Image: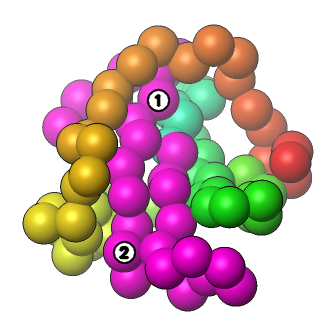
């Protein structure tokens, strides 16, 4: 699924193992913004990270570790807008 994530699309899933200052875990969004560039952001209950680059391998490992913790399932959608690194 990650290998086929087309530019301009977004993948969303829950990472139960992500450290959080509030509720357990974090909601991950990943956008394919340019050739070979995946940006990742995590948020939950009033906090969010910046958009940062993530490798395909790290993303695959995170999704696999959290495969059983998907309350809404893994979602694939067209990105409404494309983010850039450091955007909040």
| Image-based side of 72 in relation to 78, left or right | left
Q: Residue at x 58, y 53 (%)?
A: 40
Q: Residue at x 79, y 38 (%)?
A: 84
**Label 1 vs 2, first from the N-terminus:** 1
How many marks do you count on the picture? 2
- What label does residue 10 carry, if any? 1
Residue 7 visible to the viewer: yes
| Image-based side of 39 in relation to 57, left or right | right
- The magenta stretch is 1-29
User: Percent x, y for residue 57?
Assistant: 31, 65
The residue singled out by tag 2 in the image is 16
User: Is residue 82 inside the magenta stretch?
Assistant: no
Alpha-carbon span between mark 1 and mark 2: 19 Å
Neighbourhood count class around disc 2 (C-alpha, 10 Å): few under 14, some 14–19, many 20 upward: some
User: Percent x, y for residue 16?
Assistant: 36, 74
Q: Quadrant of the N terminus?
A: top left
Q: Residue furthest left?
A: 68
Mark 2 element type: loop
User: Percent x, y for residue 60?
Assistant: 26, 61
Q: Chief secondary structure of the magenta span?
A: loop
Q: Residue at x 52, y 66 (%)?
A: 26
Mark 1 element type: strand
């Amino acid at each position: 699924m990650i290998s086929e994530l087309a530019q301009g699309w977004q993948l969303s899933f829950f990472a139960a193992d992500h450290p959080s200052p509030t509720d357990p875990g974090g909601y991950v969004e990943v956008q394919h913004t340019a050739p070979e560039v995946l940006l990742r952001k995590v948020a939950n209950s009033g906090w969010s990270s910046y958009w940062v680059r993530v490798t395909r391998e790290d993303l695959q490992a995170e999704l696999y570790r959290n495969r059983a913790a998907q309350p809404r399932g893994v979602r694939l959608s067209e990105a409404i807008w494309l983010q850039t690194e450091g955007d909040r």
